[in-house]
Image (cartoon, rainbow, N blue to C red):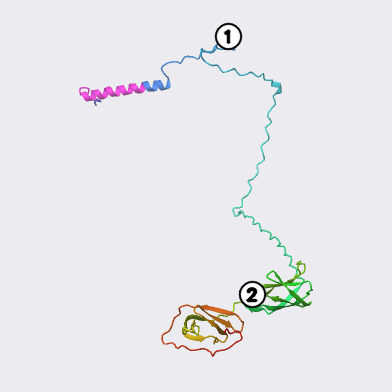
Amino acid sequence: MELADLSKPGEKKKLIGAAVLGLVAIIFLWWTFIGFGSSKPTPSPSPSRVGQRTAPAPGSRQAPAPEQVATNYNDLQGVIIPAALTGVPEARRNIFAFYEKTVVVPVASATPTPTPTPPPPVLVASVSPSNVYAKTAEFTLEVSGDKFTPEMRIFVDGRELPSKYKGPQQMSAQIPASLIASAGLRQIVVRTPDNRAYSNQVGLSVAPPPTPNYTYVGILGTKHYVGDTALLQDKNNKEILSVQRGDVLSGRFRVASISEKEIVFLDTNLKIRHSLNMTEGERLPGSPQSRPTPRVDAEDDEP
């Protein structure tokens, strides 16, 4: 059997290529395992140059040579290698253990007990009267208590009043009208002027006085006697009333005087005067004009 037909151009080229590849493979294997030449031996330093310093090249810096330390072999000691440690088993771990935060409970500090205030050495039990109306006249205040002395005085809102000592349990003072001119609470204290002996405080209530619940809306009269009849309007039911000097309204307010500017009432119970200025009220159509009470003459009537 014929391997290749060299008469054909293609077969000839294949044969040449196979030969070239085989030659390249042989050369590669030879270079890998054997090589193509020997390397030059490294020249050893000449014995005559050992210990000699090589002159530095011009323009170059040479590091200083380290100092040679002489070694004394007699001072050297051997290294002691410790024996191997005995194997210690690993400590067992509790997988269920967990860290608990320590709770610091604050210690409650003891609150100091306040020292009680000692009671006043003098006692005021009550005052009479304990309620008055503002704008009334002066009156006598009676104070009842204990441990009163002749040196003690009655004070109203810090104001010393002329006092009368009646005994260890009774004192009195005259309250001027200026101290009760307005409504409010007054503080009563019995003490000595130097405040060495003093009493507890007791209140005196000053209430606002009652006032007429009317509006002055007009006046009727002739040219010769103008202030004869006044027209008042009740603030509750808007009723128009005609009143004259001396009439009493609401059982206590007596008409003291009538003028074109104002009408003056006198509280017959408290002896307090009230003035109402002329104003424009609401007149109800068809409302009657009536006199509330008959005329009353009094000692303080004006002529």
Asked if residue 180 can be seen in this view, the reply is yes
Please state the horizontal and vertical placement of residue 73, each as a whole percent of the image. 69, 21
Magenta residues span 4-26
Mark 1 lies on a secondary structure that is: helix
Please state the horizontal and vertical placement of residue 4, each as a whole percent of the image. 24, 25
Give whichever of 92, 123 is nearer the camera. Answer: 123
Q: Quadrant of residue 36?
A: top left
Q: Is residue 9 magenta?
A: yes
Tell me the quadrant of the picture where the N terminus can be found.
top left
Please state the horizontal and vertical placement of residue 42, each as a whole percent of the image. 50, 15
Q: Earlier in the sequence, mark 1 or mark 2?
A: 1
**Predominant secondary structure in magenta?**
helix
Give whichever of 170, 280 is nearer the camera. Answer: 280
Give whichever of 80, 264 is nearer the camera. Answer: 264
In the picture of the structure, the residue carrying the numbered disc 1 is 48
In the picture of the structure, the residue carrying the numbered disc 2 is 180
Taking 166 as reference, is 210 left or right? left
Up the image or down, 221 lies above or below 80; here it is below
Q: Could you tell me the amino acid type at mark 2?
A: Ile
Residue furthest to the front in view is 224
Residue furthest to the bottom in view is 294
Please state the horizontal and vertical placement of residue 250, each as a whole percent of the image. 55, 86
Mark 2 lies on a secondary structure that is: helix
**Distance from label 1 to label 2 (Cα)?**
137 Å
